[in-house]
Image (cartoon, rainbow, N blue to C red):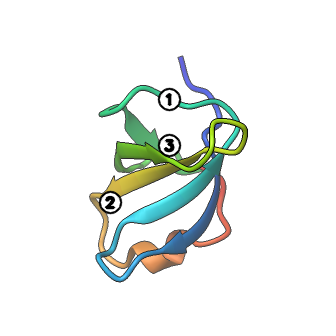
Amino acid sequence: MLQRLGKVLSVTPSQSVVVKIDRPPKLGVAVVDENLKIVGKVFDIIGPVSSPYAVIRPSVKNPEKLTNKQL
């Protein structure tokens, strides 16, 4: 079952992708873009419980292209 993860906010200097999320996913789950192409896996959940962020370890080149896109 697919569910919307959230909007990509930024890419860190270490090339991790930070996503503003509504509901925290399980760690290690695959993340896909709007074309259902796998772009990485959930590596960590950070931030306050009321406003969490997911850190994605990308499996694509140039993760900067994901900025402002929905995953």
Reply above or below: 28 against 57: above
Label 3, secondary structure: give it: loop
Coordinates of residue 32 in the picture (x, y in percent)? 47, 44
Q: What amino acid does circle 3 point to?
A: Leu
The residue singled out by tag 3 in the image is: 36
Whether residues under marks 1 and 2 lie with C-beta atoms below 8 angstroms apart, the answer is no
Coordinates of residue 44 in the picture (x, y in percent)? 37, 45
The residue singled out by tag 1 in the image is: 25
What residue is rendered at 56% in x and 50% in y? 47
Whether residues under marks 1 and 3 lie with C-beta atoms below 8 angstroms apart, the answer is no
Reply above or below: 29 against 42: above
Mark 1 or mark 2, earlier in chain: 1
The residue singled out by tag 2 in the image is: 58
Q: What amino acid does circle 1 point to?
A: Pro
Q: Is 70 on the left-hand or right-hand side of 32?
A: right
View extreme (top): residue? 1
Reply above or below: 52 against 12: above
Mark 3 or mark 2, earlier in chain: 3
Q: CA distance from mark 3 to mark 2?
A: 14 Å
Label 1, secondary structure: give it: loop
Q: What amino acid does circle 2 point to?
A: Pro
Q: CA distance from mark 1 to mark 2?
A: 16 Å
What residue is rendered at 70% in x and 45% in y? 51
Coordinates of residue 11 in the picture (x, y in percent)? 46, 74
- Crowding near the residue tagged with mark 3, few <14, some 14–19, many ≥20 C-alpha atoms within 10 Å: few
What residue is rendered at 55% in x and 73% in y? 10
* Mark closer to the observer (3, 2): 2
Coordinates of residue 69 in the picture (x, y in percent)? 65, 62
Label 2, secondary structure: give it: strand
